[in-house]
Image (cartoon, rainbow, N blue to C red):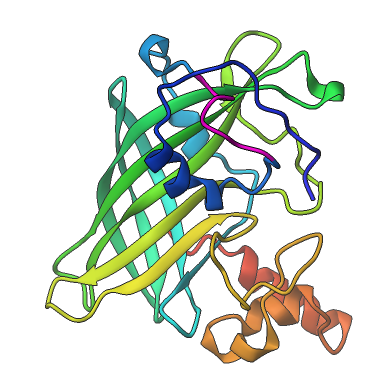
Amino acid sequence: MFFSVVLIFSSQALSQNLLSQYKPMISYIEEVNQNSIADITHSFNEDLSEIWLNEGSRIFGFFGPEYSRLRMKFLDVKKDNDLEYLISGKSRRDNITRTFNGRLRIIGIYRVKAPMELREYENGMIFGEYTILEDSLSEGSGKYTGRFVSYWHRDEKGKIRYNDLWYGSAGFNNNQFAGTWESYTGEPGQKADWGDNRIPFSGDLDVGTSEFCPSEKYRKNGWESYIKAYSGGNNSEEIEKFRKIEEQKWWE
């Protein structure tokens, strides 16, 4: 579990509808209500690109009802205006890597109060929506749409950073993306979620306690190399082999 986080400042700007939509994704906050969040969206014009380009966390994702493995990588994020960012990168599922372009649209930026031991840092959350378009010439390509929650903090120099102050704590996560994928050919939409270190709404896929661990039930759906690398391979040579596979920069 994350350290307890208590939200401060009163604001009526966060509607109950928005709160109910995002609350299930805010896993490191114990209590959230409409009157306990400070809306600072109107005064926030800093560049937040670094938050979505963080290299320090593993990104896990799933696709479809059988939790097939999905890999997502943002390679470039550029501020378009105060509340919108242009993104490009690569996705990988079913052993096919596809390029994509898209847009992040911020709905709200909020300030939160940190745990006592981290109170010197200003912390906050970002609520938003995303649209990601895979290259239409790639086999099996389509469109991702949904919502996201990201966490930020301001460092000792006053610069906004990706919030990794709780890194190493049980359940640490950031950049939680939850939505659907729809094929350009009209096939039925599929659930597609991903995030840093943990995946939102991952059901019985994630059986880990302190860190992400895919269930044996879904081993054959793209998770076998990860399970062998980090959940008990037969020997050290095999573990090393599969860790090299997991650490490959598949997007290059």
Q: At 47% from the left edge and 39% from the top edge, which residue is drawn?
A: 52
Tell me which segment is drawn in magenta: 31-38
**Number of dots carrying numbers:** 0
Q: At 22% across and 68% down in the image, what residue appears?
A: 142
Quadrant housing residue 58 = bottom right
Query: Which residue is located at x 59 percent, y 87 percent?
Result: 218
Is residue 113 toward the left or the right of residue 65 in the image? Answer: right
Q: Is residue 19 above or below residue 161?
A: below
> 118 or 221: which is nearer to us?
118
The answer to whether residue 252 of the structure is visible from this angle is no
Say left or right for 59 vs 207: left
Compare residues 140 and 181 and report the one nearer the observer. 181
Above-or-below relation of 207 to 111? below
Whether 36 is among the magenta residues is yes
Q: Give percent across and percent down for residue 7.
A: 65, 26
Q: Residue at x 71, y 11 (%)?
A: 156
> Residue 185: in sight, yes or no?
yes
The image quadrant of residue 45 is: top left
Q: Where residue 83 sits in the image (x, y, percent)?
A: 31, 25
Left or right: 145 in relation to 226: left
* Majority secondary structure of magenta residues: loop
Check residue 206 for magenta coloring: no
In front of the other: 85 or 98:
85
Which quadrant: the C terminus?
bottom left
From this view, report whether residue 97 is shown above or below residue 119. Answer: below
Query: Residue 72 placed where, x, y %?
Result: 44, 59
